[in-house]
Image: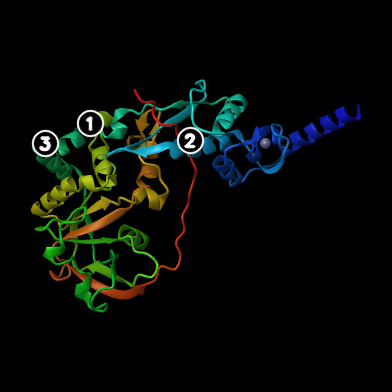
Amino acid sequence: MYARISRTYLKLQARLRGDHRSPLCAECFQDHGLRRMARAVRGKSVRCRQCGAVSVHGLSREQLHDLCQTFFVRGSIIAADYGASPLIQFNDLRENELDVEGEINADIALLHKTIGIGFFHYGPRLWMLGAVEPLQKLRTRRGRRPVINRILRTYPVRELTPRDEFYRVRKAPAEASDAAQYDAPPDEFCGSGRLDSPSNSMLYGSQDIEICVHECRFSAGDELYVATLAPTRTLRLVDLTEILEETGTEFDSLDLTVLMLFLAGSHAYEITRELAASARAKGFDGIIYPSYFSMLRTGGMPFETMFGIAMRRIRETRSYEKAKVIGNLALFGHPIADGNVQVAGINRLVISKVAYAVTFGPVMSPEPSG
Ligand SMILES: [Zn+2]
C-alpha cells in the first residue's frame, strides 16, 4: 500500500517537474559515445522513467532527435571524390532496418520503442555524391572549358577595396620584416596549390587568421609571421562563395558543382587551376573561393537536405548555408611587387591554443561482399 502511494507520489512529483517530457536520460544508453554526447546536452533533472537513474540529463523528444541527427547522421557521413553523404538516416515513419556493430543496437531499439523513430541505411540521391552534370563535364577535357566560362559569367564580381584587410601567414621567412616575403612565391615554386600553376602565381590570403593557420598545417613550435595586407586600389574578384539562385534540379546545379569542386581534395586541383587561369585571362584580379576547411571551421555539415532538396536551394535556409562557408582570397600575379597590395603591418604569430570540437558516430558493419 505504502509503496503504491509513494510511487504515485513520485510520479506526480515527476509530472510537476516536467519529467514526462523526458522520455529518456543519458544513462539509458549503452553505447559509450552516444552516452557521452547525451551527457553533454543541457537536460532536465529527472528520476528516469526508463532506466530509473537519477540524472541531470533527462532529454526531451526534441533533444533526442537532435542527438540522433548528430550521432547517427553526421556520425555516418562519408566523403566521395566529390560530395558527401550520410550512410544512416531516420524518421518517424520507418521501421528499424539498421544493423550496426555493438551495443548501439540496444540503443537503436530503445529509441524506436520510446520515441518511435526508425533508422535505416540511407541510399543518397546521386547528386550528393557528385552526379551533377556541370561537374561531370568539368572532369572531362572536352567539357571543361565551356563550364568554366559559364562559372565566370554567372558568379558575381566582388570589389576588394583598400579598407578590406586580409592576412597571409608565413613560416620562417628569410627576413621576417621584409614586405616582399609575404608576396606570392617566385614562379619556380608555383604549381603545387589549389589554384596556382607554373605560369600563374598566386597570393593566397584570408580574412580569417585561423583558416590561414589551418590551411598551411602550421603547428606549435613553428616560427610564424603574419602580414596584414590591404589592396592599394579597388580589386575585382569573382566570388565563388555566393549561393546561386537557380532553376532546374540539383543534378544540373552549377552552385553545387562549384562548392563540391572546392570541398574536394587534390584530385580537383587540375580543374581549379584551369578555372583560376581563365579568370586571370578574363581580367579579374583574383578569386574568392570556399575554403576546403569551411565545414571544420564553422562546424557545418556539407550538402544538407530537407525533404530531399539541397538546403542551398531553399530560400529560407540560404543564409544558414551561406554561414557554413569561409571565403579565401587568391590574388593573381605578385600583387605586392605589382603594387596592387600593400603590407599594412607584420607581426609574429603565436599559436597559443588549439581547440577541437568532436562528436561521435556508430561503427558501421563492412559492406557484405559478393
Ligand atoms: Zn534513463
Q: Position of residue 248 (x, y in %)?
A: 25, 28
User: Is the C terminus in the top left, top right, bottom left or bottom right quadrant?
Assistant: top left
Q: Which residue is mark 1?
A: 252
Identify which residue is drawn at 48% across, 28% down.
Answer: 90
Q: Which residue is mark 3?
A: 143
Name the secondary structure under disc 3: helix
Report, in whole angstroms, how far the alpha carbon at label 3 lies from the one at label 2.
38 Å
What amino acid type is highlighted by mark number 1? Asp
Q: Which residue is mark 2?
A: 72
Few, some or many residues within 10 Å of mark 2 (<14, 14–19, 20+): many
Identify which residue is drawn at 49% across, 45% down.
Answer: 359
Report, in whole angstroms, how far the alpha carbon at label 2 lies from the one at label 1.
29 Å
Identify which residue is drawn at 25% across, 30% down.
Answer: 251
The disc, 3 or 2, on the residue closer to the chain's N-terminal end is: 2
Is 36 displayed left or right of 355 in the figure? Answer: right
**Quadrant of the image where one finds ligand 1:** top right
The disc, 2 or 1, on the residue closer to the chain's N-terminal end is: 2
State the scheme by which the image is colored.
rainbow
What amino acid type is highlighted by mark number 2? Phe
Q: Which mark is residue 340?
A: none
What amino acid type is highlighted by mark number 3? Gly
Q: Position of residue 65 (x, y in %)?
A: 54, 34
Disc 1: residue Cβ within 8 A of ligand 1's nearest atom? no
